[in-house]
Image (cartoon, helix red, strand yellow):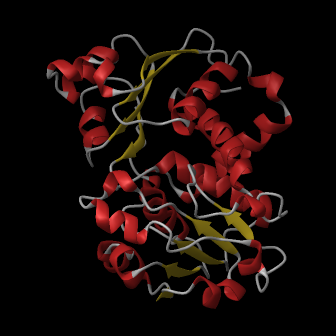
Amino acid sequence: MRNLMNITDLSMEEIQSLITTAEDIIANPVKYRDACKYKKLATLFFEPSTRTRLSFEAAMYELGGSVIGFSEASSSSAAKGESVADTVRTVGCYADVIAMRHPKEGAPLVASRKAGVPVINAGDGGHNHPTQTLADLLTIWRKKKTFENLTIGLCGDLKFGRTVHSLVVAMARYAGVKFIFISPEELRIPRYILTDTLDPAGIPYEEVSSMEEAMPKLDVLYMTRVQRERFFNEADYIRLKDTYILTPDKLSNAREDLVIMHPLPRVNEISVAVDDDPRACYFEQVKNGKYMRMALILKLLEVNV
């Protein structure tokens, strides 16, 4: 039985296989509409979510399966003090696969040891968000047709941004990749990402504070919001929240084939005036997330179509 806690739980070959499946789903949706008939997905979301939860639910429905679960901890027995382990052990009696989001890092890993069915980490605190990374990878692949020799800029909240952490770890496995980390001092990429992943492999990176300085070098620009829910101090959040705002003017020296991404939700960090730019791919990312979650569910349930 397989779980997905971290993007590195999947080999590069497995990621490419999921991309192949996702592209086949895009091309031939009818072929997959009964693939998970009589299968049930449980969505256990102990933290608010719109895109990720609905994406998982849409993925399962489009595979012909059904969905059970809850969208906030207050509507589950966690409100009565039940442990995560007991919750998932119970839900594992009802469902074939579980997608779980939790504010505490490592909670889905604990769940995976008790559930008895495959568990997918749908985001654990500021740690990992592997299925968002699958969406990101499919988006990059469909635009660039390669993961190699790309310069990737990640901008905004790099300290708490779990989508950033997962994407860096995923892309670090490909040849010729370079990272430019764009953030204020207080929100820099965690040291462990550099010392555990990039430095040992000799992967080049820069840490800068200027978006404009980095822009001409980038093949991919990954914007993130400053996450109010991760701050202990409201004053710090207010001071930092609008540090980077992407506008058409700031794209004036960007490459014509730049891929602009954002895991969403956005607040102010990308002007709506950018939405009509052909380089803006963040709503396409949303669709790609559904297709990759469909492919992942098929893999974990060992369903062949």
Q: Quick one: quadrant of the N terminus? A: top left
Q: Quick one: quadrant of the C terminus? A: top right
Q: Is residue 193 left or right of residue 151?
A: left
* Snapshot quadrant of residue 18: top right
Q: Is residue 210 above or below residue 189?
A: below
Q: Is residue 228 above or below residue 254?
A: above
Q: Can you name the residue that lies furthest to the left here?
A: 81
* Snapshot quadrant of residue 85: top left
Q: How many marks?
A: 0
Q: Is residue 187 above or below residue 143?
A: below
Tell me where residue 140 appears, x and y as whole percent: 70, 61
Tell me what residue is drawn at x 67 percent, y 84 percent: 215
Tell me what residue is drawn at x 37 percent, y 79 percent: 194
- Please state which of residues 235 and 33 is positioned toward the viewer in this rendering: 235
- Please state which of residues 95 and 184 is positioned toward the viewer in this rendering: 184
Q: Is residue 113 above or below residue 285?
A: above
* Res. 280 in view: no
Tell me where residue 301 appears, x and y as whole percent: 52, 26
Tell me what residue is drawn at x 72 percent, y 87 percent: 216
* Res. 211 in view: yes
Q: Is residue 169 left or right of residue 291?
A: left
Tell me what residue is drawn at x 77 percent, y 62 percent: 273
- Please state which of residues 50 and 82 is positioned toward the viewer in this rendering: 50
